[in-house]
Structure formats: structure tokens, C-alpha cells
């Protein structure tokens, strides 16, 4: 009787459609196609690609400034950190819906397209570098605009300045691990939004998931670009070396979080169907 049941179970499992074991395969294919389009745009029209990267850096940086301002103004409220963290997902939503180029989400997209063999790892490295520099330019532009608008005339104890110092003065390994966690969460937000059909559902899942990394204080390299540039232009005591220290380790952590913890595993568990 036991042998019969085992054989019956084996026969039943053999009839399970292959698609059932790869329910997220469309996500991999969509991400791969996105990675290919990004690499093609950079190769064929680098000016237009870089403009998209600059715009993404600008969108995220203005939201970063609102985040620090909300946190500072609501410092005495038990809900201050909650509201500030919940708002931050608006930045990623702006980037997703405007189809601009963010370094951290590209860690996931290009890892998948390269694992699929549709882009090379050399193309991936080149795109990551170009996108990173474009995001940095965007962060600097917004910091400069805020400076000339007088918005960065802040007291020394403003949360923007104290937050920047706290981020920069952590140990390198701690920043690296927090960078892994930050982009693991950010890329999960992007990956989950791809499974949603309605725009409001996409926005809701992005805001809800991104809240996690902000509330827990993890390290997002592109957001930190905005924080550091605004703090330095605003007269904070943060030094360039301290900012570079954080960006080095947070960037490396972000690559691991997006590519190794999201892009590659999602592709591995959803391989192409057998011929």
C-alpha cells in the first residue's frame, strides 16, 4: 500500500505543468527585456540615457530633502519618523513611472539580463557606472538649486546635518551590510510592483516596501548623494572624505543587495523552459 501511494504521488508530480514551477518567469523576461533596452539606449544614444539618469537623481534628491525636513519638523512627534519614512517611497514611484534611470534598480535589471545572456557583464558594468554618475549629477543639481533658493540655510543641529554625519561616521563594514539590506528592499519593491496590474497598486506596494529600509536606517547610495551634497552646501560639518567613505561601502552593498539577493536568485528559480 505504501509503495502504491509513493508511485501514485510520483506519477502525479510528473504531470505538473512545467509552468507551475516557474510562475514568475514573466517577471524575469520582462526584467531582461528592460535591461536590454537600457543597454541599447546607452550604446545608441548616450546623451538621452544620461539625461534619464540625471533626472532620476534629481527626483530622488528632492524627496530626500523632504524626508529630512519632515523628520526634523516632526522630531517631537512619535509619528515623525513613520511619516517621513512613508513619504520616501514617492521618490521611487516617480522614477518608475517616469521611466528614468536609477543605479540601484538597474543592479537588479542588468543582473537578470546578463544571467539570461542577453547583455554582457561588461555592458552591465558600463551601464552601472554611467547611471551612477548621472544620478550623482542629478543630486548635485538639486542641491545647488536648493542652495540658491535659500532652502539650505539650516541650523547646525538640523536633522539633515546630524543625519549626514551619522551616516558618514559608521564603520565601513556596517555601511556595506546596510547597503545590502537597503537595495535588497528597494529591488524587492520594484520586483513586486512589476506583478501589479493597476498603477495605484504599484504605487502602494512601492511606498509600503520602501518604508522598511528608511525606517530601519539602511544605506542607499543614491539617496546619500543627495543628503551629503545638500549638507555640505548648507554649511554642515561633513567632509568630502567622510562622504566618499560612506558612498564607497554603500555602493558596493547596494550592488550585492540588488544583483546577488534579488536579480540572480529570481532568475535562477525561474529558468527558461526546456526545449
Image (cartoon, rainbow, N blue to C red):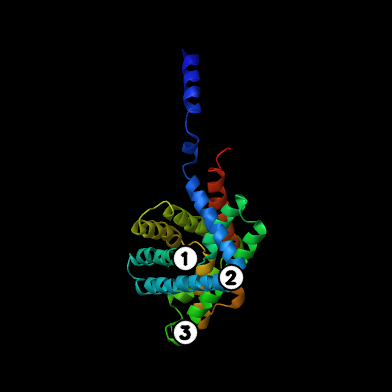
**Above or below: residue 197 compared with residue 129:** above
**Disc 3 marks which residue?**
147
Residue at horizontal 45 percent and vertical 82 percent from the top: 146
Residue at horizontal 58 percent and vertical 78 percent from the top: 239
Local SS, label 1: loop
**Above or below: residue 36 compared with residue 223:** above
- Position of residue 129 in the picture relative to residue 74 (left or right): right
Q: Earlier in the sequence, mark 2 or mark 3?
A: 2
Local SS, label 2: loop
- Position of residue 54 in the picture relative to residue 155 (left or right): right
**Above or below: residue 204 compared with residue 73:** above
Give the tally of numbered discs: 3
Q: Earlier in the sequence, mark 1 or mark 2?
A: 2
Locate residue 13, reporting x and y percent: 48, 27
Locate residue 33, reporting x and y percent: 53, 55
Q: Quadrant of residue 252?
A: bottom right
Number of other residues with Cα within 10 Å of mark 3, as a class: few under 14, some 14 to 19, many 20 or more: some
Camera-nearest residue between 227 and 101 = 101
* Front label number (3 vs 1): 1
Locate residue 208, reporting x and y percent: 38, 57
**Disc 1 marks which residue?**
99
Camera-nearest residue between 79 and 5 = 5
Distance of label 3 from label 1 (alpha carbons): 27 Å
**Above or below: residue 143 compared with residue 56:** below
Residue at horizontal 50 percent and vertical 41 percent from the top: 22
**Disc 2 marks which residue?**
45
Q: Earlier in the sequence, mark 3 or mark 1?
A: 1
Locate residue 15, reporting x and y percent: 48, 28
Amino acid at each position: 500500500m505504501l509503495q502504491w501511494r509513493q508511485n501514485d504521488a510520483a506519477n502525479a508530480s510528473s504531470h505538473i505543468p512545467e509552468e507551475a514551477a516557474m510562475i514568475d518567469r514573466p517577471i524575469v523576461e520582462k526584467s531582461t527585456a528592460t535591461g536590454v533596452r537600457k543597454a541599447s539606449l546607452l550604446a545608441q544614444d548616450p546623451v538621452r540615457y544620461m539625461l534619464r539618469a540625471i533626472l532620476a537623481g534629481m527626483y530622488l534628491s528632492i524627496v530626500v530633502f523632504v524626508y529630512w525636513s519632515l523628520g526634523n519638523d516632526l522630531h517631537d512627534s512619535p509619528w515623525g519618523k513613520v511619516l517621513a519614512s512613508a513619504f520616501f517611497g514617492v521618490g521611487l514611484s516617480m522614477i518608475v513611472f517616469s521611466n528614468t534611470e536609477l543605479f540601484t534598480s538597474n543592479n537588479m535589471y542588468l543582473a537578470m539580463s546578463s544571467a539570461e545572456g542577453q547583455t554582457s557583464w561588461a555592458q552591465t558594468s558600463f551601464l552601472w557606472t554611467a547611471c551612477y554618475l548621472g544620478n550623482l549629477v542629478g543630486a548635485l543639481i538639486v542641491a545647488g538649486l536648493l542652495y540658491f533658493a535659500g532652502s539650505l540655510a539650516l541650523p547646525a543641529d538640523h536633522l539633515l546635518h546630524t543625519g549626514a554625519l551619522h551616516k558618514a561616521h559608521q564603520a565601513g563594514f556596517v555601511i556595506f551590510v546596510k547597503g545590502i539590506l537597503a537595495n535588497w528592499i528597494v529591488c524587492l519593491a520594484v520586483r513586486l510592483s512589476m506583478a501589479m496590474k493597476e498603477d495605484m497598486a504599484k504605487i502602494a506596494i512601492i511606498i509600503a516596501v520602501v518604508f522598511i529600509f528608511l525606517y530601519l536606517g539602511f544605506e542607499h547610495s543614491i539617496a546619500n548623494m543627495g543628503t551629503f551634497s545638500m549638507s555640505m552646501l548648507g554649511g554642515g560639518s561633513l567632509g568630502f572624505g567622510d562622504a566618499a567613505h560612506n558612498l564607497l561601502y554603500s555602493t558596493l552593498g547596494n550592488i550585492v543587495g540588488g544583483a546577488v539577493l534579488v536579480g540572480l536568485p529570481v532568475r535562477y528559480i525561474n529558468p527558461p523552459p526546456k526545449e
